Image: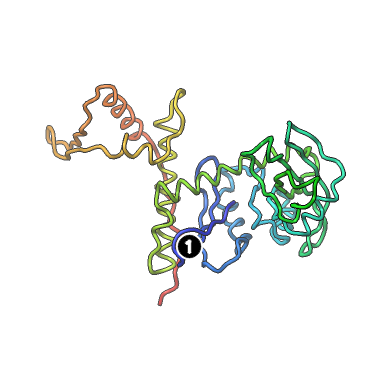
Amino acid sequence: MASRKAGRPSHHPRKALLGCGYVVNLWNRSGNTHSAEQALPFYDQTRRALAGRVNIDWVLGESGFAEDAMLTHLEQEPQRYIMAVRLTPYVLAGIQAIGTWCQIEDGLEIGELPLALSTWTRPRRFVVVRQHIHKRPHAPGKQPLLFADLEEHREWRYSVMVTNDTVLAAVDIWRTYRPRANIENGIKELKYDYGWDEFNVHSFGGTEAVMLLVGMVCYNLVHYLNRCVLHTADTVLARLKTLRPRLLAIPALYGSGGRRPTLRLGIQDRSLRGKFCYWLAQISQLTVRLVNCNAVALPR
């Protein structure tokens, strides 16, 4: 689950949920909303849409979703979750109270503690990862300004997560959460390859409709073709900026041949022509069902 504020100042925040490389739900929201605004109805709508198709093992979210109402809702289902947590002064005070750090690798240590934030109704399990800035210079995390004068902490970057799982070791909680970083790559791809943040129109509903078309039709269709048609054992999934000049921007003439509509592609390379014939044959056998757009706007 992710929330992003990007693009032009009108209808710009995005709330999207991605799984297995696909966007499975997407809402547009007003630009002055908190990242957790409407998180619960968004999650419930997504869960209902996936019911019977996908089993949700974990709910992974960024820090904007680590709100008491959201976490309580997941706990009551029950649904396992791991959410990032902001490094507030209250959280940093809890980090300083950790007495034992477990070294996973050189320059990588993990600790944990029970902690209740001021807006929460009860304590929850926090997992803290710290990585040494000199031994692991490219590691993620933040260096809190409040730790600048503390010798024990000033050489580390910190990441904090909260979870309702009480069985897995802290290092396994961290390893489970790490793949969520792929969502950021998906959002970047939507922005820079598909121009997702450049499609704001005058109406809120119109903007959302375009977002849905780009994010849940075009983006997912390209990924579907990548996985089901173009992907082979010796290649990796290509981004749109790679596919566009190689496969999509091909000059062609549309006419007829033997009284049948014919598309003549301008491909000289015999090997590439063979691949195109194979890909087109595979595409003709695909059965893809597009869902209705759920963008709604009130009449003026």
Most extreme residue toward the bottom is 300
| Number of dots carrying numbers | 1
Image quadrant in which the C terminus is located: bottom left
Tell me if mark 1 has few (under 14), some (14-19) or many (20+) residues whose alpha carbon lies within 10 angstroms of its own.
many
Q: Could you tell whether 6 is left or right of 142 in the image?
A: left
Name the foreground residue: 87 vs 11: 87
Tell me: residue 265, above or below residue 145: above
Tell me: residue 7, above or below residue 250: below
Could you tell me which residue is drawn at 69 percent across and 58 percent down? Answer: 70
Q: Which residue is mark 1?
A: 12
Tell me: residue 84, above or below residue 134: below
Could you tell me which residue is drawn at 59 percent across and 48 percent down? Answer: 51
Q: Amino acid at mark 1?
A: His
Name the foreground residue: 13 vs 77: 13
Give x and y (percent) for residue 147: 76, 52
Q: Could you tell whether 83 is left or right of 45 in the image?
A: right
- Give residue 298's quadrant in the image: bottom left
Give x and y (percent) for residue 27: 51, 59
Name the foreground residue: 282 vs 238: 238
- Give residue 230's quadrant in the image: top left
Tell me: residue 31, above or below residue 148: below
Q: Could you tell whether 239 is left or right of 182 in the image?
A: left
